[in-house]
Image: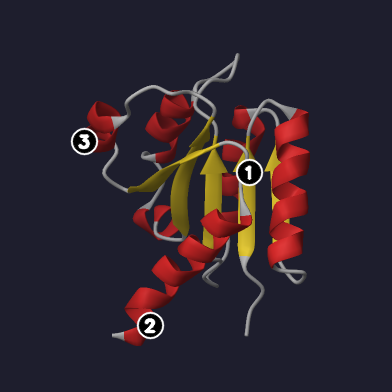
Amino acid sequence: MKKQRYMVVDDDPTNNMICEFTIKRFDKEAEIKTFSIPEEALASIKMEYSTTSEALPTVLFLDVNMPTMSGWEFLDVFMQFDEWVKGQFTIYILSSSIEDFTKKAEIYPFIQGFLSKPLKLTHLEEIREELLQPLLK
């Protein structure tokens, strides 16, 4: 079985470290990429996922409030990628904000869920169950 891939996009290096630690604790074999600059994450996605014919299913944890580009601006750029690229991502907003994201969920229906920081093992267990659902049907 392939290693599960994770990507964390958050300007807070402490949160990135917590995410990496939690993911590794959950799945020692996981492949994890963290980005503190959202533009670098988008460039990496464009380069790595656009140039391969191999599917690279990836869980993406995205912060909303970042200084150079918000999570929503990130998603606006992400939506311009080819369907092949977008189809490889399962996206979760990971935020410390207590904001109601109902309106944003309507604009970005491909977001799988909204999680509060810090990332917890229970979040990862729930995500694994969600990812396995289509395989069990």
User: What residue is drawn where x is 71% and y is 26%?
Assistant: 12
Looking at the image, residue 68 lies above or below residue 132: above
Amino acid found under the numbered disc labelled 1: Val
Give the camera-side residue of 16 and 74.
16
Left or right placement of residue 53 versus residue 17 in this view: left
Looking at the image, residue 87 lies above or below residue 100: below
Identify the residue under disc 1: 8
Looking at the image, residue 127 lies above or below residue 113: below
User: What residue is drawn where x is 55% and y is 58%?
Assistant: 122
Q: Label 3's element?
A: helix
Give the camera-side residue of 126 and 28.
126
Looking at the image, residue 75 lies above or below residue 88: above
Q: Earlier in the sequence, mark 1 or mark 2?
A: 1
Identify the residue under disc 3: 106
Q: Residue furthest top?
A: 67
Quadrant where the C terminus sits is: bottom left
Q: Earlier in the sequence, mark 3 or mark 2?
A: 3
